[in-house]
Amino acid sequence: MFKVNLHLLEACNFRCRTCFAHFDSKRLLSVDEWKRIIDNLYKSGRVNAVNFAGGEPFIYPRLGELVEYAHELNLKVSIITNGSLITQAWLDRYAHCIDMIGFSIDSFDRNISIAMGRCSCQGQTFGINEFLQIYPQLLAHNIKIKINTVVNKINYREQFSHNLAGLRIDRWKVLKMKAFDNGRFSNHDLAITMEQFNFFVKNNPYKNRIVEDSMVNSYFVIDANGDLLDNSPEAYGRVGSLLTESFNAVFARFNFDRALYESRYTEHELHAA
């Protein structure tokens, strides 16, 4: 059983240069269209979890409705966010539908975050102080907590993990930045070597850490057009539309690396996710 990432929109209030979610999909699907896609995934018999992503998913105006819909189908629901737009009122209303919230945090240092573009146009960042404001609310609602950190040329020397000491972080995923160039966006100047990536990993131990040096064809990415994407090249390729074809038909054409997908989970997590 698989987890599928639903990138509801490409828009984001941050401008992170490490982000891989540049699909050139400016369309904004309706709630009903996303429900059709979720139904498609559910009926395939292959998917038991969906992860709402972006851009920044909290910009999507009816995110809560989609979270509730997926939950009602008994799909496990997670969200990956930069954290800046979460409110206590939203959590109070929708937390019962959510298994996990992941936070994209590449640095707890404000200056490093700004250097990477991990900030708004007004210079708003999401660091340790902002995370600690939300953290008690997540615990109170029994939501699992995940952190994703993309290691790149600017942050690979940072001592990051000491900020997590004493906190209940269910999973810290450390990823080597994927160099990306689609002709309009490029982050090649932030690319790092395996030696630099391993330097960060060695200097940032954590008990619930997962290390990934490749994301190629081991994630199910549905873009804001409703298309499953192939991410083996630097720019994405379209495999097929989940609005017009069944997930099983599209999956049959997907160059999927099952071994890499399964390597990021324990046996128990594979059964659940």
Image: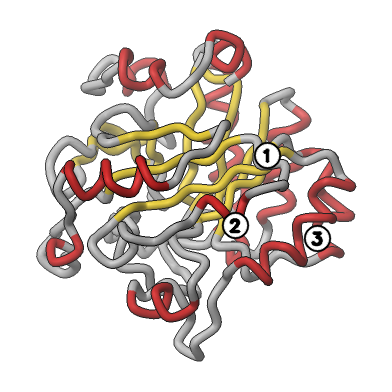
Q: Three-letter amino acid code at disc 3?
A: Trp
State the residue at coordinates (34%, 63%). Answer: 155
Q: Is residue 22 above or below residue 34?
A: below
Residues 110 and 67: in front is 110
Can you tell which quarter of the image residue 213 is in? top left
Is there a contact, CB below 8 Å, between mark 1 and mark 2? Answer: no
Is there a contact, CB below 8 Å, between mark 2 and mark 3? Answer: no
For mark 3, give the secondary structure: helix
Residue beneath disc 1:
100
Residue beneath disc 3:
90
Query: Gap between marks 3 and 1, in whole Å?
Result: 15 Å
Residue beneath disc 2:
163
Q: Three-letter amino acid code at disc 1?
A: Met
Q: Earlier in the sequence, mark 2 or mark 3?
A: 3
Q: Earlier in the sequence, mark 1 or mark 2?
A: 1
Residues 72 and 182: in front is 182
Residues 228 and 2: in front is 2
The x, y position of residue 253, in whole percent, is 23, 20
Callout 1 crowding tier (Cα within 10 Å): few <14, some 14–19, many ≥20? many
Front: mark 2 or 3: 2
